[in-house]
Image (cartoon, coloured by chain):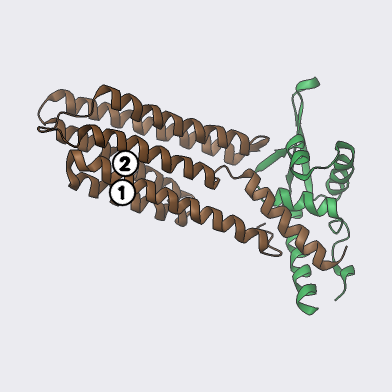
Chain colours: A brown, B green
Amino acid sequence: MEPGEAARLLAQTQADSRRSLDFRAPWVSLVAAGVVLVGFGIVWLNVRNQHPFSGPSPVSLVVFYGLIALRIATVIYARARARAGVSGHSVTVQRQEAMVMAAVLLVWYVVLIAIAGSGQHGAGFDWSLGLSGTLIVLAVVWAGRCAIHNNWRELALTVPVAVIAVVGAIAGPRGMWLVDGVGLCVLLLVIAAFGSRRRRGTRTRLVRTGA
Amino acid sequence: MTAEALDPLIHVPARLQIMAALATLPDGDQLSFTRLQDMLELTPGNLITHLRKLEEAGYLATSKTGSGPASRTSVALTADGRHALDIYATTLRGLLNGV
């Protein structure tokens, strides 16, 4: 085997393996972008003319949470397919992280229900806290996880999520659905574009072991 | 420097592919035999032969869990294996730059 041929084979195998084992494929981000835009858009269309604001209708909430469930199912499917046959330390760590994330969300929702149940605030405050607060909590927990792993690139992605949540809260209980929907959709499209570019880039690069 | 400077154990297409694929896993992770076979599109017999050679050199470690039809063989690169692949890639770069 000639050195040039060996270099091409090494680079190609590593690029193919990375692509095969990485569940965050661009198509997953594209599906998420569509889901986010439709989900948030449906709720926004439902609440945009409410005066006074009383909150999204049960039908729009069923569609919204149904689409979130679809997004979660897509990620679980993509992950299971990409990580089939992989075992060891990183798998255990990812399982623990998922449990921590679920526990944090559970506690957060208990707090939200308690605040809404107290009846001290209006529907506008409760929904703003529910949506923007949840996005900020998710961004903070994910940022902490990225900091532990020294994954600064992914940590940087949590900043726009928090910014979108804050801008959404400022936009009010009606406008936040539009701001958050469009903001998160654009962010996911950018992630998909970068992912696609990175995958194309690794295909042409020679001799990178990554070991 | 000539191509003979390259580690002869790695400088075989199938073994280079095995090493390269396993190097993309983080330290402490293993890949099942069947998944590795799917990824590299090698026949079971061919893959076993090459895995044995790399294992004898201490470049990778295999582990078996379960028994009977449900048993599963997993493969991982050892620290020596990662080091050997690093040296191989560096030598390859040197050869290509010298051309």
What residue is shown at x 35% (from left), y 32% (from top)?
Answer: A105
The quadrant in which the N terminus of chain A is found is bottom right
Q: Report how far apart the C-alphas of labels 1 and 2 lie in the structure.
A: 7 Å
- Position of A179 with respect to A6 (left or right) is left
User: Residue B49 at what x, y percent from top left?
Assistant: 90, 42
Q: Circle 2 — which element?
A: helix
Amino acid on which the number 1 mark rests in the picture: Ala
User: Residue A45 at what x, y percent from top left?
Assistant: 25, 35
Residue B94 seen anywhere in this rendered image of the structure: yes
- Position of A25 with respect to B2 (left or right) is left
Q: In this figure, what is the number of numbered marks?
A: 2
Task: Give the class, few, some or many, for how many residues have Cα within 10 Å of label 1's Cα (few <14, many ≥20).
Answer: many
What residue is shown at x 26% (from left), y 40% (from top)?
Answer: A177
Residue B26 seen anywhere in this rendered image of the structure: no
Q: Which residue is mark 2?
A: A135
Q: Which mark is residue A162?
A: 1
User: Residue A195 at what x, y percent from top left?
Assistant: 53, 53
Task: Verify CB contact (< 8 Å) between mark 1 and mark 2.
Answer: yes
Foreground: A37 or A144? A37
Chain of residue at mark 2: A
Classify A126 as above or below B94.
Answer: above
Task: Give the class, few, some or many, for how many residues have Cα within 10 Å of label 2's Cα (few <14, many ≥20).
Answer: some
The quadrant in which the C terminus of chain A is found is bottom right
